[in-house]
């Protein structure tokens, strides 16, 4: 283990005795790592950022119970780990038919999420809570992106500020913003904080186009009561990981990684192991017959 900052990482990525570089981090840092390794044509795998979508179709509103289940998956997909996870489904695409009722319920539930100190033993193992973001630099970044979106006309459905009950620490309320995908930068930018951007869609084709309309391609989630639609839309998603009827489960047996600017290669499972191996072909000619391709002159020995 070599602790250190960017200088240590750059040194490792460029070192001639390193055969394989597996990097997890930001897109910008991943580009630098790949460039350093490319000088010696070194094997690189990159697990970078994301701006994953969760697509909610109108058939989830068949009952209050199904609606509530969908709302909880949307909340978990974005606010679990305080939004500080590369695969967070931080873009919600909701069918316009059920958007008003769904968003009312979603906003109410987001506002009810308790904010807790992760060092408080009383709540350290609690579920359904939200803690602070990791640093002041990250706090400032998230607040800037939220304020920029609000100033540009994004509608605040929940949160959007520091909680009054938490004057200390890098806390941000669970935030839900209704935006216009073509207008607001927060729809395209990885926030890495407890911020969910929301837009509506009319039909399946528009939902797929909006979900895929990003430079990233790490993950996607689909919530629908129609199993055939779930399979169809999952196949159309430009993402390395697709969840149907859920968001964020991770299994060590399954490959993990993205497409587009979300990275190169895979981690976990046999796919992840293969990334650290170099296959070698060894061929032995076992026939007693000559090749017979060329006509060779008779030996004059």
Image: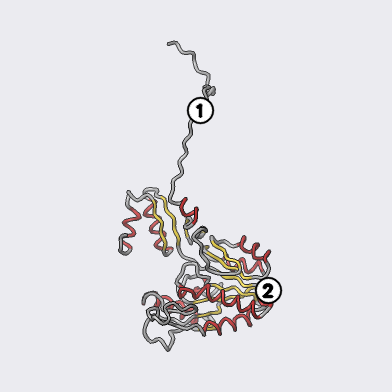
> Is 229 on the left or on the right of 163, as rendered?
right
- Secondary structure beneath dot 2 equals helix
Rendered location of residue 224, percent (x, y): 65, 70
Rendered location of residue 63, percent (x, y): 68, 79
> Is 180 on the left or on the right of 191, as rendered?
right
Q: Residue at the bottom extreme?
A: 164
Q: Quadrant of residue 142?
A: bottom left
User: Is residue 157 visible from the viewing direction of this image?
Assistant: yes
User: Residue at coordinates 47% horizontally, 39% vertically from top-left?
Assistant: 281
Check disc 2: other Cα within 10 Å, few if <14, some if 14-19, many if 20+.
some
- Secondary structure beneath dot 1 equals loop
User: Residue at coordinates 36% horizontally, 54% vertically from top-left?
Assistant: 36
- Nearest to the observer: residue 258 or residue 223: 223
> Is 189 on the left or on the right of 69, as rendered?
left
Residue labelled with disc 2 = 59
In the image, is residue 22 above or below residue 77? above
What colour scheme has been applied to the protein in the rendered image? secondary structure
In the image, is residue 105 above or below residue 190? below
Rendered location of residue 23, percent (x, y): 41, 59
Q: Which tag, 2 or 1, sits closer to the chain's start?
A: 2
- C-alpha distance separating marks 2 and 1: 63 Å
Q: Residue 5 has which mark? A: none
- Nearest to the observer: residue 100 or residue 69: 69
Rendered location of residue 22, percent (x, y): 41, 56
- Front tag of 2 and 1: 1
Residue labelled with disc 1 = 286
Check disc 1: other Cα within 10 Å, few if <14, some if 14-19, many if 20+.
few
User: Is residue 260 visible from the viewing direction of this image?
Assistant: no
């Amino acid at each position: 283990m070599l602790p250190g900052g960017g200088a240590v990482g750059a040194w490792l990525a460029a070192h001639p005795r390193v055969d394989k570089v597996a990097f997890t981090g930001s897109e910008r840092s991943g580009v630098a790592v790949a460039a350093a390794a490319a000088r010696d044509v070194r094997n690189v795998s990159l697990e970078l950022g994301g701006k994953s979508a969760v697509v909610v179709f109108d058939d989830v509103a068949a009952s209050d119970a199904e609606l509530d289940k969908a709302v909880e998956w949307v909340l978990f997909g974005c606010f679990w780990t305080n939004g500080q996870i590369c695969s967070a489904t931080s873009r919600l695409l909701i069918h316009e038919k059920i958007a008003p009722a769904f968003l009312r319920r979603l906003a109410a539930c987001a506002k009810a999420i308790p904010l807790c100190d992760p060092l408080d033993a009383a709540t350290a193992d609690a579920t359904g809570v939200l803690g602070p973001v990791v640093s002041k630099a990250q706090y400032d970044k998230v607040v800037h992106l939220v304020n920029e979106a609000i100033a540009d006309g994004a509608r605040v459905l929940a949160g959007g500020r520091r909680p009054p009950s938490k004057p200390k620490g890098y806390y941000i309320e669970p935030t839900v913003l209704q935006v216009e995908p073509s207008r607001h930068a927060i729809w395209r930018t990885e926030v890495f904080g407890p911020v969910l951007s929301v837009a509506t869609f009319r039909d399946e084709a528009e939902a797929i186009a909006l979900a895929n309309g990003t430079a990233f391609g790490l993950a996607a989630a689909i919530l629908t009561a129609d199993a055939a639609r779930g399979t169809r839309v999952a196949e159309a998603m430009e993402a390395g990981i697709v969840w149907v009827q859920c968001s964020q489960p991770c299994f060590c047996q399954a490959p993990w990684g993205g497409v587009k600017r979300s990275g190169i290669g895979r981690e976990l499972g046999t796919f992840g192991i293969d990334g650290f191996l170099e296959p070698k072909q060894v061929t032995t000619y076992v026939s007693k017959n000559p090749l017979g391709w060329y006509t060779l002159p008779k030996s004059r020995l």
